Image: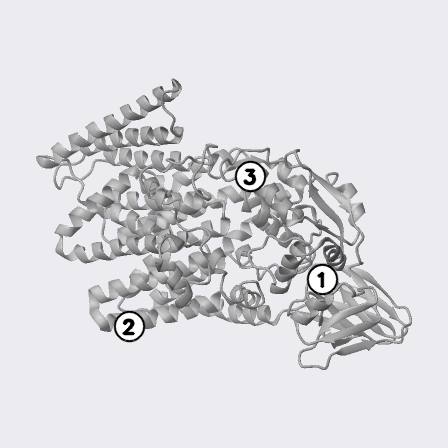
């Protein structure tokens, strides 16, 4: 009987959802991405094809081989894969990709991206809708808040950055749980819920969004606690929040601990370089796009000409929601109790944009230098997520005071209609004069104004048809409001996440057949200048997402596209890179030709890729003389630091065939040699986390493996573990005994083991406590 009752409730709720305009919050994101997922295409522009799908495909191939995807041997002479935070290997929704790969291979995995992006946008909208409802606002307010947030320029324009898309979707859910925690009498259940939601966002794979959400949640909790209960509630809420954060840390430890280790050994071990940190600061002229989103064009339309890229400064929430948020600023000021909330939200918007402006104001540079946390990330414009949230919430409150105008309000409404008509007329006149050659302004100006005029007319008509006084909004009118906002935001975001045929991701063994024969056990290398031109002048231009046929991307083997064809590359396009690798590559690119040639030999590079000038994205492959991936040398010269090792390698008189430079801190420098009898090394088997070799060194010596040195690797020589030395700044070396030896390199990072144990204990404990709270 109880099960039947639950089934009836669920069925009734489901029917109620689809009879309510709130369903648009769930459907609109799937409409936005329909040209991709519904048409059987796949996302490709930017990081989907150069990072996310290659990472997940490599992880899937590793899992199929019977290993966990801890290490990626095909990028940068080896790099952590699971510890690469943005890969999101333990984020549960990402497991859908592995299921799709099991059913339909790489094409199905690639197809799943657009569907999951739409699902996260819908999840973000529904979370915002529930938050607005929890704040006591009505159905239309919930609808406006959900659409304004989920279809905002911030979320839609960045949707191709899949870890941002996943992480930002949890922001309203975290704030919803935080609000409930502040107001809960018994906080155990609320703490558990907040801890789970924080953990899911932390597993989603974007540290910057997670950090901004955490800061926003702290401000949100402090505001509601002080407003509703003063200092005693603030103290109680803070303790609950700390408990929730500790729960989240334990639940996500299997991801966070390996990532923390990687961070300590990465190029971001210190602070981000100041110039890099402020690369994407909010361009002040983009404030215009808060009401005219395509004023400077749109790369989805092929006509963007503004500063930098389009998506970093995108923050449009819809013209009608902007009007409603402005109405809220006026209406809330008249309501005593809500005035405090108004001040908080306005302060949040102002603070967000002051930080987002980055280098354009002295505030962020000062914080970068003096306050911990501000030096961790680049692109300060991403702080605008706070403003997008606050504006969407203000728009929801603006709905509550929306009624049919009369008196002075009616006069201003009619004046608004006249202004909209004038805007349309001006845009049409500008277009006409432009066609006659009498006017020379960017066409994006009058197109954006024309669209704004149409939307303003629609909003004005809805305003004149709004309910009278306290009269409830009719269903038809509410549906019309929902569709106007949806059409506005769908138009603004259309084309920003382009798709391509699944042919790009089909298995094509013939594509690089000749190259595979040339590579053998070696690696491919693409010079940095050629990589830059291929990316930003041909395949992934910022002004036009449809500038070249995406099918050519696969043939270029841009990093990390090489993973799709299992081509080992010395390049790496991961956000975190081993610090030594980063320093080596920077030295390589700046070195004279003779030194560069020697460094490439060290890296095992036997094919260098070149861009063919004047032929678009066409490339050629040049055979190169390289040292083998694994080699025997007789002598090792000990130095105390990486600096000394770099000097020795770049000295010009160093012979890597007979010698290796190893780092032994605080050890006396000198040379350690075998007897001089010729030795030999061969690789028997190589997989993601394991390299098996056989060595024959009659007089002893050293085995040098041209793979990146990194903590967590262990060397087993004839059944006994031996130390791995840092060789030639970047690589690995072990001391060989006299005679034959079986050598095995195994990647077993303690950070992953500890994280796995902690999370394996935390998840069952969380479910047990949650179940107990339900029963009590």
Q: Is residue 27 above or below residue 270?
A: above
Q: Label 1: how many residues lie within 10 Å, few (<14), some (14-19) or many (20+)?
A: many
The residue nearer to you, when weighing 23 against 354, is: 354
* Residue 644 appears anywhere in the view: yes
Mark found first going from the N terminus, 2 or 1: 2
In the picture, residue 219 is in which quadrant?
A: bottom left
Mark found first going from the N terminus, 1 or 3: 3
Q: Label 2: how many residues lie within 10 Å, few (<14), some (14-19) or many (20+)?
A: some
Q: Which mark is residue 42?
A: 3
Q: How many marks?
A: 3
- The residue wearing badge 1 is 707
Residue drawn at point x = 59 percent, y = 47 percent? 50
The residue nearer to you, when weighing 473 against 128, is: 128
The residue nearer to you, when weighing 265 against 503, is: 265
Q: Are marks 2 and 1 in contact (CB under 8 Å)?
A: no
Viewer-nearest of discs 2 and 1: 1
Measured as percent of width and height from the top left, residue 100 is found at: 58, 46
Q: Is residue 43 above or below residue 65?
A: above
- Side of 475 where 314 appears, left or right: right
Q: Is residue 539 above or below residue 242?
A: above
- The residue wearing badge 2 is 236
> Is disc 3 placed on a helix, strand or loop?
strand
Residue drawn at point x = 27 percent, y = 28 percent? 423
């Amino acid at each position: 009987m109880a099960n039947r009752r639950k089934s009836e409730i669920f069925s009734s709720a489901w029917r109620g959802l689809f009879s309510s305009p709130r369903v648009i919050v769930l459907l609109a994101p799937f409409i936005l991405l329909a040209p991709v997922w519904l048409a059987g295409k796949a996302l490709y522009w930017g990081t989907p094809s150069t990072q996310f799908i290659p990472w997940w495909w490599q992880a899937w191939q590793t899992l199929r081989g019977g290993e966990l995807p801890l290490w990626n041997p095909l990028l940068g002479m080896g790099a952590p894969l699971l510890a690469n935070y943005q890969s999101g290997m333990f984020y549960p929704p990402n497991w859908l990709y592995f299921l799709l790969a099991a059913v339909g291979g790489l094409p199905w995995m690639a197809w799943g991206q657009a569907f999951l992006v739409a699902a996260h946008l819908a999840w973000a909208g529904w979370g915002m809708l529930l938050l607005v409802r929890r704040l006591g606002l009505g159905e239309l307010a919930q609808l406006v808040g959900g659409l304004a947030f989920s279809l905002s320029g911030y979320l839609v324009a960045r949707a191709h950055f899949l870890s941002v898309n996943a992480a930002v979707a949890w922001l309203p859910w975290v704030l919803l749980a935080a609000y409930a925690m502040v107001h809960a009498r018994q906080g155990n259940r609320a703490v558990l819920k907040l801890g789970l939601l924080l953990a899911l966002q932390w597993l989603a794979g974007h540290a910057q969004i997670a950090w901004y959400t955490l800061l926003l949640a702290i401000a949100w909790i402090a505001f509601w606690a002080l407003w509703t209960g003063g200092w005693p509630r603030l103290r109680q809420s803070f303790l609950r929040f700390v408990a929730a954060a500790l729960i989240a840390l334990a639940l996500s430890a299997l991801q966070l601990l390996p990532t923390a280790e990687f961070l300590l050994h990465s190029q971001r071990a210190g602070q981000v370089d100041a110039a890099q940190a402020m690369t994407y600061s909010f361009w002040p002229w983009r404030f215009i796009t808060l009401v005219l989103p395509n004023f400077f064009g749109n790369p989805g339309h092929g006509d963007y000409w503004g500063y930098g890229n389009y998506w970093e400064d995108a923050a449009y929430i819809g013209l009608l929601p902007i009007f409603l948020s402005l109405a809220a600023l006026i209406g809330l000021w008249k309501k005593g109790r809500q005035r405090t909330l108004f001040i908080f939200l306005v302060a949040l918007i102002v603070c967000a944009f002051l930080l987002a402006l980055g280098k354009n104001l002295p505030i962020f540079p000062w914080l970068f230098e003096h306050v911990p946390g501000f030096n961790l990330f680049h692109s300060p414009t991403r702080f605008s997520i706070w403003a997008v949230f606050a504006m969407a919430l203000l728009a929801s409150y603006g709905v509550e005071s929306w009624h049919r105008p009369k008196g002075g309000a009616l006069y201003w409404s009619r004046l608004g209609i006249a202004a909209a008509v004038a805007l349309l007329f001006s845009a049409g006149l500008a277009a006409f004069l432009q066609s006659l050659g009498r006017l020379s302004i960017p066409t994006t100006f009058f197109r954006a104004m024309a669209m704004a005029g149409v939307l303003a007319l629609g909003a004005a008509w809805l305003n004149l048809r709004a309910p009278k006084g306290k009269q409830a909004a009719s269903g038809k009118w509410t549906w019309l409001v929902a569709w106007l906002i949806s059409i506005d935001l769908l138009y603004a975001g259309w084309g920003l996440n382009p798709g391509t045929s699944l042919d790009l991701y089909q298995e094509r063994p013939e594509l690089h057949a000749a190259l595979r024969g040339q590579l053998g056990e070696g690696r491919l290398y693409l010079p940095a200048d050629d990589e830059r031109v291929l990316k930003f002048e041909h395949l992934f231009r910022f002004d036009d997402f449809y500038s070249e046929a995406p099918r050519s991307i696969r043939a270029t083997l841009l990093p990390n596209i090489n993973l799709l064809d299992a081509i080992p590359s010395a390049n790496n396009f991961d956000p975190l890179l081993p610090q030594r690798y980063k320093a080596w590559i920077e030295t390589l690119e700046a070195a004279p030709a003779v030194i560069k040639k020697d460094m490439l030999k060290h890296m095992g590079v036997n094919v260098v890729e070149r861009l063919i000038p004047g032929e678009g994205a066409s490339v050629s492959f040049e055979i190169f003389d390289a040292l083998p991936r694994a080699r025997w040398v007789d002598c090792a010269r000990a130095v105390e630091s990486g600096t000394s090792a770099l000097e020795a390698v770049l000295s010009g008189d160093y012979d890597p065939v007979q010698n290796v430079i190893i780092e032994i801190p605080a050890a006396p420098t000198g040379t350690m040699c075998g007897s001089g009898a010729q030795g030999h090394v061969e690789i028997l088997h190589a997989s993601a986390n394991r390299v098996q070799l056989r060595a024959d060194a009659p007089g002893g010596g050293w085995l040098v493996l041209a793979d990146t040195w990194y903590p967590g690797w262990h060397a087993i020589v004839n059944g006994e573990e031996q130390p791995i030395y840092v060789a030639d700044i970047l690589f690995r070396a072990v001391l060989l005994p006299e005679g034959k030896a079986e050598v095995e390199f195994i990647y077993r990072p303690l950070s992953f083991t500890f994280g796995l144990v902690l999370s394996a204990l935390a998840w069952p404990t969380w479910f047990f406590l949650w179940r107990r709270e339900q029963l009590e």
